[in-house]
Amino acid sequence: MRIGEMVRRTGVSERLLRYYEEQGLLAPDRLPSGYRVYREEDVGTVRRVRTLLTAGLTTETIARVLPCLREQDRRLVPICPDLVADLRAERARITRAIDELQASRGMLDAVIEAGPEPAPGVEPVA
């Protein structure tokens, strides 16, 4: 299928599909004219990429783990022995980032609370 059909089937823009290709997440065939031709299984690949991005993984990490994941009953299942350990490391990285953001928010809350109350009728900046 050509890129327009891939956009319709996945809901992902042409720009993102090209970006996924640049990142090594997709490898469409090329016609002599240079047009990209996607395979049916590329639709599933895009779905897996979107899921992993939503889970907080970087495209670099996704390129590494994508070959070790299969879809089973609409869930991603690791099939390579070392993948679960890699995913646990990614989860720990995300947890650290969340902890750092929560600490930053706490510091900002303390500064806000120490400040004067906003004048009546003035909306606080969120």
Image (cartoon, rainbow, N blue to C red):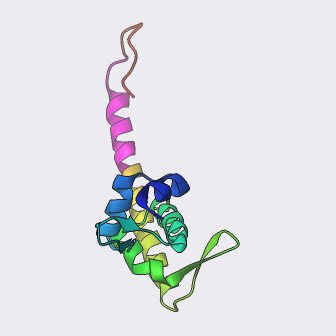
Considering depth in this image, is 81 or 114 the residue closer to the camera? 81
Residue at point 42%, 64% (across, down):
94
Considering depth in this image, is 28 or 19 the residue closer to the camera? 28
Q: Is residue 16 above or below residue 40?
A: above
User: Residue lying farthest front?
Assistant: 32
Whether 113 is among the magenta residues is yes
Residue 16 position in % (x across, y down): 37, 56
Q: Is residue 125 above or below residue 33?
A: above
Residue 53 position in % (x across, y down): 45, 61
Picture quadrant of residue 109: top left
Taking 5 as reference, is 114 left or right? left
Magenta region, residue range = 103-117
Taking 79 as reference, is 117 left or right? left
Whether 82 is among the magenta residues is no
Residue at point 44%, 79% (across, down):
65
Residue 47 position in % (x across, y down): 53, 64
Considering depth in this image, is 33 or 20 the residue closer to the camera? 33
Residue 66 position in % (x across, y down): 46, 77
